[in-house]
Every structure is written in C-alpha cells, then in structure tokens.
Amino acid sequence: MGKVTGLDPGEGQSRLIVRRGEREFLVPYVPEIVREVNLDGGFVIIDAPAGLLD
C-alpha cells in the first residue's frame, strides 16, 4: 500500500500518515482498520474500507 511516515495524534483520533508515490493518506488508527502493527517485521496490516485510499 505504501510507507508509514508518521502518526498524527489528531483531535479525538490518531491517524497513520501513509505515503504512496506522490500521494499521502491519513488512515484512522482504530482496531477496525489497523489490524496489526509489527515493529520487528516493519509492517502494518490494515483493512481499508472502500474509498479510504482513493
């Protein structure tokens, strides 16, 4: 999907900042979307709802 470049604490909800090419996406950091964060493996598994990455 892309590379996680940061975490935006936001107001009320944190979001992962993900860069793919020239585009940047804000992915809500909630268990319904962010399924796994593997720091040792260097990856995050998300279940993106339709339209989130458009």
Image: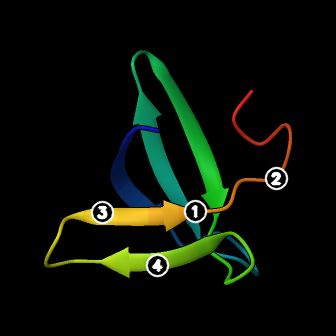
Element at label 4: strand
Q: Earlier in the sequence, mark 4 or mark 1?
A: 4
Task: Kindly report the distance in space between the C-alpha atoms of the residues bearing marks 1 and 2.
Answer: 9 Å
Tell me the tag on residue 36.
4
Q: CA distance from mark 4 to mark 2?
A: 16 Å
Question: What residue would you read off at disc 2?
Answer: 49
Question: What is the distance, in whole Å, between disc 3 and disc 4 at their CAs?
Answer: 8 Å
Colouring: rainbow
Earlier residue among tags 3 and 2: 3
Q: Is residue 17 left or right of residue 33?
A: left
Residue type for callout 4: Glu
Q: Secondary structure at mark 1?
A: strand
Pointer 3: what residue?
A: 43
Task: Give the residue number, with chain letter if any, for mark 1.
Answer: 46
Q: CA distance from mark 3 to mark 2?
A: 19 Å
User: Mark 3: few, some, or many residues within 10 Å (few <14, many ≥20)?
Assistant: few
Whether pointer 4 and pointer 1 mark residues with C-beta atoms closer than 8 Å, the reply is no
